[in-house]
Image (cartoon, helix red, strand yellow):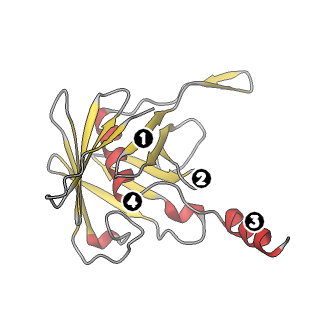
């Protein structure tokens, strides 16, 4: 599990957090109103940036919008194409599609608080890198998937590249993690009606 340290400075217009990736060392996240930057502290320098180019249209999303046309993202000068869902009634609508350098990743809501980082556009059952959780202060906790057995077969989850891991962490910081499901909404309504 990753650790997060809040490094908020009252005199600055940004918030910084440190994320322990568990496999690639520590990463710094820097949040400004219109952008989020992430970079590793160790190894080959690498920076992921997500910026809002239009107005803030949502206070529920850390980056301020889920409109793809109002977002710009990149990793070391190379473009990252983001396709965020609308985050409405269904858990599926909280997905964020990520494409860069011929790769496709997906950040998919798993429950109210967590999202799974997937290798590919959908969940095949054997392509989950791990679970990311955005925490108070803007950090992200990371829990990478472990091998598991299903029907007498051991499933070995994929290991994210350094780029995959950093992109997933920055996307989770920018859009948040988790999402409501229709079942959760219906159960909440039923519980509030019945004594």
Q: Nearer the viewer, residue 19 or 169?
A: 19
Residue at image coords 73%, 69%: 186
| Quarter occupied by residue 162 | top left
Q: CA distance from mark 4 to mark 2?
A: 15 Å
Residue drawn at (53%, 52%) of the image: 113
Report the quarter where the C terminus lies: bottom right
Asked whether the viewer can see residue 119, the reply is no
Q: Quadrant of residue 60?
A: bottom left
Disc with the residue nearer the chain's start (1 vs 4): 1
Q: Earlier in the sequence, mark 4 or mark 2?
A: 2
Disc 3 secondary structure class:
helix
In space, the residues marked 1 and 4 are separated at their CA atoms by 14 Å
User: Residue 177: x and y, percent?
Assistant: 47, 54
- Residue drawn at x 57%, y 35% as measured from the top left: 126
Residue behind mark 2: 111
Instruction: Give the CA separation, mark 1 to mark 3.
Output: 28 Å
Q: Give the number of the disc on residue 187.
A: 3
The residue under label 1 is 141
How far apart are the two marked residues, 3 and 2, measured between alpha carbons? 14 Å
Upstream in sequence: badge 2 or badge 1: 2
Q: CA distance from mark 2 to mark 1?
A: 15 Å
Mark 3, other Cα within 10 Å: few <14 / some 14–19 / many ≥20: few
Indicate which disc, 3 or 4, sits on the residue closer to the N terminus: 4
Q: Which mark is residue 175?
A: 4
Q: Nearer the viewer, mark 1 or mark 4?
A: 1
Depicted 153 relative to depicted 171: above or below: above
């Amino acid at each position: 599990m990753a650790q997060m340290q809040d490094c908020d400075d009252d005199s600055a217009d940004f918030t910084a957090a440190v994320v322990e990736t568990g496999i690639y060392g520590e990463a710094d996240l820097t949040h400004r109103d219109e952008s989020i930057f992430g970079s590793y502290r160790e190894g080959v320098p690498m920076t992921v940036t997500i910026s809002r180019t239009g107005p803030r249209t949502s206070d529920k999303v850390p980056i301020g919008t889920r409109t793809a046309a109002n977002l710009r993202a990149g990793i070391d000068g190379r473009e990252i194409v983001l396709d965020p869902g609308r985050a409405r009634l269904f858990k599926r609508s909280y997905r964020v599609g990520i494409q860069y350098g011929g790769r496709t990743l997906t950040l998919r809501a798993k429950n109210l608080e967590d999202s799974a980082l997937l290798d590919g556009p959908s969940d095949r059952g054997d392509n989950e890198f791990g679970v990311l959780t955005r925490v108070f202060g803007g950090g992200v906790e990371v829990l990478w998937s472990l091998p598991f057995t299903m029907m007498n077969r051991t499933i070995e989850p994929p290991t994210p590249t350094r780029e995959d891991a950093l992109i997933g962490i920055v996307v989770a910081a920018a859009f948040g993690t988790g999402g409501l499901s229709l079942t959760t909404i219906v159960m909440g309504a039923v519980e509030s009606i019945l004594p």
